[in-house]
Every structure is written in C-alpha cells, then in structure tokens.
C-alpha cells in the first residue's frame, strides 16, 4: 500500500469550529509548524469569504513553505475566480451529492451536478490547476450516483475526489465499503473527510485508507464543525501502528503542534486526549505501575518517546506499594517496609479527599506523621 498523504484542514475546517477565529499571524505560525513537521498538504482557507481571507491565504502562500497549499470553494465559477487570486497549489471545489442536500438546500436535480462539473472543472483545468472535487454529504448519497460524479470529474480533469462524511454518520465497515466502491470506479486520488459526530472519525479515516483512499483530511486536536474532524495526531500514529504505514510526519512534533493550536484556538485539549493529552502516558494503578517497571510494553502500546514524551506515574487511590517506594525513592529516601502500608493508606485518603496527587511537601509530611506514629509506645 502507498504512503497515506496527510492533508491538514486545521486552518479551514478547523477554524470553522464554533467560536474559533485565527489571526493572520496565528495562521502563518500554524502553517509553518505543520509544514516543518512534514505535513505535505495544508487546506488554509476560503477565498470567497472576501479580501481579508484572500490576504490571509496569500500571506501563507508567500511563506513558500514545503507543504502544498490548498484552498476551499464551492463548485462555482465565482468561487473558482476567488481561488485564482491566491495562487494555490491545489483548488478544492465542493458540491453536494446527496439528495437531501440537492433537494432541500439547493433545490437542484442530480443533472445539475453533472453540468457544474463540466462547466467549472473545465475552466479550472484550463488554468493548469490541480483540482480536487469535494463530494459533500457523500456518505448519505446514492453510491451509484457518487461513482458517476467521480467518473465524470476524472474525465473532466479532476485529479482528486474527496469523499465527505459531512455529518459523521459512517462506521468503519460502511466507510470501507464506500471507498472500495469508489476505488473501483476511478483511478484518481481519493481523500477521506470524516467528521466525529459519533466518535468514529479516526476509525473511519483508517478504514478508508485500508480500502484505497490516498489522502486523509485531518485537523490538529480534531478541531472542526460540531464534534470536529479526524484528529491529525491520531491518524498519523494509528496509520503507523495499525496499518504499518508511515505518513512522513515527524511524530515528535505532534505535541508541540497540539499546544500551538490549543493556544491559538482557545480550545483546551482534554487531559485524557489520545496522543497529545497531558494524561495520555500517565499511570496510577498499582498493577500497571508494577508492570511498567518490569517492561513498559505491558501497559503501553507504543513508546511515548516516539512523540518526544515520557511516561509518568502518579500517586492516587489506585496506587500500590511499589508506587509508594518509587515516589519516595525519587526524593532520595529509602522507606522502612513497615511504613509502606501506612503511607499508602495516607496517600489514598489524600487523593480521595483532595482529588489530586500529593506533592513533595505532602509526601514529606506523610512520612513524618507515619514515623512519629511508629515511634509511639504501644
């Protein structure tokens, strides 16, 4: 299987997260960081929004990054014209393909889609642009119609078709089937655009890659409309470990990217967020702490060093004796074995009452209290 191409839509669909708006400086910084991490394609904005958006996109283009720059538009001549002002590497032009969208949003028949493809894609390829056609709401469309749309797009000069699960209703099994059908219909690039409304965006993206998709549309921290898009960091790491396919993205840069986007977006990354959450490699359970001490593979699917991270052990309600010994050992103290159960009980009580791990001062205080109790006459 070929190397999956990661397309980062952090600056386009990611910015469409409710309440998120990046400054030009923030967009340039994020684009530079993504490109520096080896992300090969960046979807950076929507030219038809007007002069300010075009200026922002142009600022990114002017950075002359290693990554290819894509802009988004509707499959209309006016949106194509706006895109041309930006001089992007790739123009993505989107059109609804589900009857729900065609009938209720646009009040157009299916034949209108074919006409738009012939007219607008025909104009786009005249300018020598690389064109990506977006099949909006493809996951709820007639599969035979989606195949016809893709076939016509290919014959009109489109180099890529984006299969969009616009409202996040697919599961990995139906995703695989849909992309496999599309792969049989066309010879061009296929990109999966998955939304996370049911928490399946990353899983669906992996299924699409297994079925023959060449590109994955993702966003750092899973930003995007409603519940967001497939998370860039999850897709990169899962492709490596579950599909055995390296995307070429520097995994040690993923945490830094996450923090940069977290700050710029104002959207806090959850403690337990996979890959980049601060608790992703934090362990408390005594059984797990003991297993990790013997061999990290017992309770970690991959080495956190791949992300430039380290595992950490915290003391809490579920800690065991070994964790207590290790915690005090880190302070340069060797415990008397008769104090270990006393300290463990105290630590568990503290975690339950305070809802947090004891700090160094707490540990010293617990030790003094336990030592004093041990010295008292029976």
Image (cartoon, helix red, strand yellow):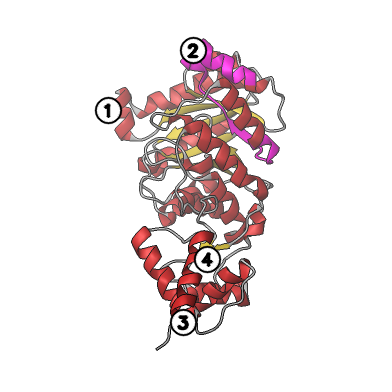
The circle drawn on residue 104 is 1
Q: Earlier in the sequence, mark 1 or mark 3?
A: 1
- In 3D space, how far apart are the residues under numbered discs 1 and 3 (Cα atoms)? 77 Å
Label 4: few (<14), some (14–19) or many (≥20) C-alpha neighbours in 10 Å: some
Q: Nearer the viewer, residue 241 or 188?
A: 241
Point out the tag, 2 or 4, that comes first from the N-terminus: 2
Residue 46 within the segment the image draws in magenta: yes
Residue 244 % position (x, y)? 64, 59
Disc 2 versus disc 4: nearer the observer: 4
Q: Residue at x 57, y 18 (%)?
A: 56
**Dot 1, crowdedness within 10 Å: few (<14), some or many (≥20)?**
few
| Residue that label 4 marks | 364
Element assignment for label 2: loop
Q: In the rendered image of this protein, does residue 118 appear above or below residue 324?
A: above
Mark 1 vs mark 3: in front: 3
Where does label 2 land, which residue? 50
């Amino acid at each position: 299987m070929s190397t999956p191409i990661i397309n980062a839509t952090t600056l386009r669909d990611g910015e469409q997260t409710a309440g998120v708006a990046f400054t030009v400086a923030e967009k340039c910084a994020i684009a530079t960081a993504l490109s520096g991490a080896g992300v090969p394609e960046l979807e950076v904005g929507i030219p038809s929004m007007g002069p300010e958006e075009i200026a922002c996109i142009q600022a990114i283009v002017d950075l002359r990054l290693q990554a290819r720059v894509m802009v988004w538009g509707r499959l209309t001549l006016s949106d194509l014209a706006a895109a041309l002002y930006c001089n992007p590497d790739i123009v993505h032009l989107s059109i609804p393909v589900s009857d729900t969208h065609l009938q209720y949003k646009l009040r157009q028949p299916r034949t209108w889609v074919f006409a738009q493809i012939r007219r607008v894609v025909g104009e786009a390829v005249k300018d020598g642009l690389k064109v990506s056609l977006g099949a909006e709401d493809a996951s709820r469309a007639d599969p035979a119609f989606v195949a016809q749309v893709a076939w016509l797009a290919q014959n009109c000069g489109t180099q890529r078709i984006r299969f969009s699960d616009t409202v996040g209703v697919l599961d990995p099994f139906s995703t695989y089937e849909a992309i496999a059908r599309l792969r049989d219909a066309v010879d061009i690039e296929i990109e999966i655009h998955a939304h996370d409304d049911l928490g399946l965006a990353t899983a669906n993206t992996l299924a699409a890659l297994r079925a023959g998709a060449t590109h994955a549309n993702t966003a750092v921290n899973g930003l995007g409309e409603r519940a967001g898009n497939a998370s860039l960091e999850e897709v990169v790491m899962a492709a490596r470990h579950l599909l055995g396919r390296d995307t070429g993205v520097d995994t040690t840069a993923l945490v830094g990217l996450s923090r940069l986007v977290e700050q710029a977006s104002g959207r806090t990354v959850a403690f337990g967020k996979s890959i980049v959450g601060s608790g992703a490699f934090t362990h408390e359970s005594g059984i797990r702490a003991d297993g990790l001490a013997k061999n990290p593979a017992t309770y970690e699917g991959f080495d956190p060093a791949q992300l430039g991270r380290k595992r950490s052990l915290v003391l809490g309600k579920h800690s065991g004796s070994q964790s207590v010994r290790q915690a005090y050992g880190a302070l340069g103290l060797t415990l008397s074995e008769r104090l270990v159960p006393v300290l463990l009980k105290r630590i568990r009580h503290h975690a339950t009452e305070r809802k947090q791990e004891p700090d160094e001062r707490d540990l010293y205080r617990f030790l003094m209290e336990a030592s004093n109790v041990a010295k008292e006459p029976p």
